[in-house]
Every structure is written in C-alpha cells, then in structure tokens.
Amino acid sequence: MVSIAGGEPLIHPEIDEIVRRLIARKKFVYLCTNAILMEKKLDLFKPSPYFAWAVHIDGLKERHDHSVCREGIFDKAVAAVRAAQAKGFRITTNTTFFTHDSPDTIRQVLDFLNDELKVDQMMISPAYAYEKAPDQEHFLGVEQTHELFRAAFADGRRKRWRLNHSPLFLDFLEGKVDFSCTAWGIPSYSLFGCSAPAT
C-alpha cells in the first residue's frame, strides 16, 4: 500500500503517471488531497480497485473552511467527491479532530460523510501535538482524546460508521486499551530515502 501525501500531491506535474505506475505494480494507492484541484484533474486518473482518493475534510462547512483558512473549500471538496463518485472512483476521507471539537461535532461530520456523502471509508485522528506545530493549544492530550472519543462513540455509532481503522485503534481512542506507540509511527519513503518510524 502506498499513501501519497503532501502538501498537495496534485500539483506534481507527473502525479497521474506516478499513480499509474504504482497501480501497474499492483500497489494499493491512496492519493491524499485537499480537493482544491481534484475535480479539475479527475480525467487524468482512471477508477481502479487499487486506487482511492483520500480527501481531507476536517469538519462541516464552517469548521472545515476555518481549518484551511479559506472560504468555499468545503463545498469544493464535496463537489469533487461527488464528481469522482459519479465516475466510479473509490473515496476515502481523512478527518482530524482538535480541542475545539466536541462529541457532537464528531458525530455530525461522520454522519454526514457516512450517510449523506456516502464515502467508501473514513479515517479519523486526534490532532497529535508535535514540537514544531505553530498552534500548540489546540492539540489533544491523551486524556482529552479518550474522553472525547469515548463520548462520541457512546451511542454505538462507531459500529455503523464505515471507519477505515482496526478495532485496536478505535479502542485506543476510547481509552479501552493502552499501547506504547508514537504519532506517525510508520516507515516512509521519500526523495530523502527510507525513514524509520519515530520512536
């Protein structure tokens, strides 16, 4: 599996060729995007069981637009998702939750993505604090994360949402289990070579 993240990968002049070659090698490709260029570039790609768009949607309209510091981006992302669905593409979303989110806002955005937008799967994450982040006050601590997700999942919706996570991760979010892990603890490969997980 290859996750092509950014920045914004769609600005790369050969992104369609990169995706095509990875698919030819039977790699599952998740192309992460903020969806600003997605609808414009859809015709460069073909639906494949090996390909999925991973669209960042960090809340409903007002919340998402505030998060990306630009009005109209939520509507643009939703329009791009619908256009891609109409062409037969697989769609996943990636949503990050911060201290100003509540159990209710989490349920609202996941209900929208699951029931109204009908994306194939959803990825969620608490905003992990890291040293160089400019806005330290909005990152969730471990206890805040457990409280937030325990309340958000309390009515059993966790089982009905199409979440693209193992039950272990979701149990961790709720504080049901504890693991020795780090944020972004995955190996990656870039122009600078292979990078081991953070420890």
Image (cartoon, helix red, strand yellow):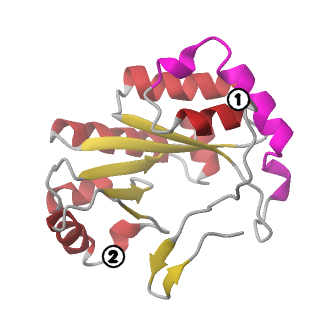
Residue at image point 61% right, 34% down: 170
Cα distance in 3D space between marks 1 and 2: 36 Å
Q: Answer yes or no: do the residues labelled 1 and 2 have beta carbons within 8 Å?
A: no
Residue extent of the magenta highlight: 136-161
Nearest-to-viewer mark from 1 and 2: 1
In the rendered structure, does residue 150 fall within the stretch colored magenta? Answer: yes
Please identify the residue farthest to the bottom as the structure is shown: 192
Q: Is residue 153 left or right of residue 176?
A: left
SS label for mark 2: loop
Which of the two discs, 1 and 2, labels the residue nearer the N terminus? 2
Q: Residues within 10 Å of mark 1 (few under 14, many from 20)?
A: many
Q: Nearer the viewer, residue 133 or 169?
A: 169
Residue ID for mark 1:
149
Q: Is residue 53 above or below residue 175?
A: below
- Label 2 crowding class (10 Å Cα cut-off): few <14, some 14-19, many 20+? few
> Considering the image in quadrants, where does the N terminus appear?
bottom left
Q: Is residue 183 above or below residue 123?
A: below
Tell me the chief SS of the magenta region.
helix
Residue 128, visible in the rendered structure:
yes
Residue where numbered disc 2 is placed: 12
Instruction: Residue at 55%, 32% (x, y): give it.
Output: 167
Q: Residue at image x 74%, y 53%?
A: 180
Q: Amino acid at mark 1?
A: Phe
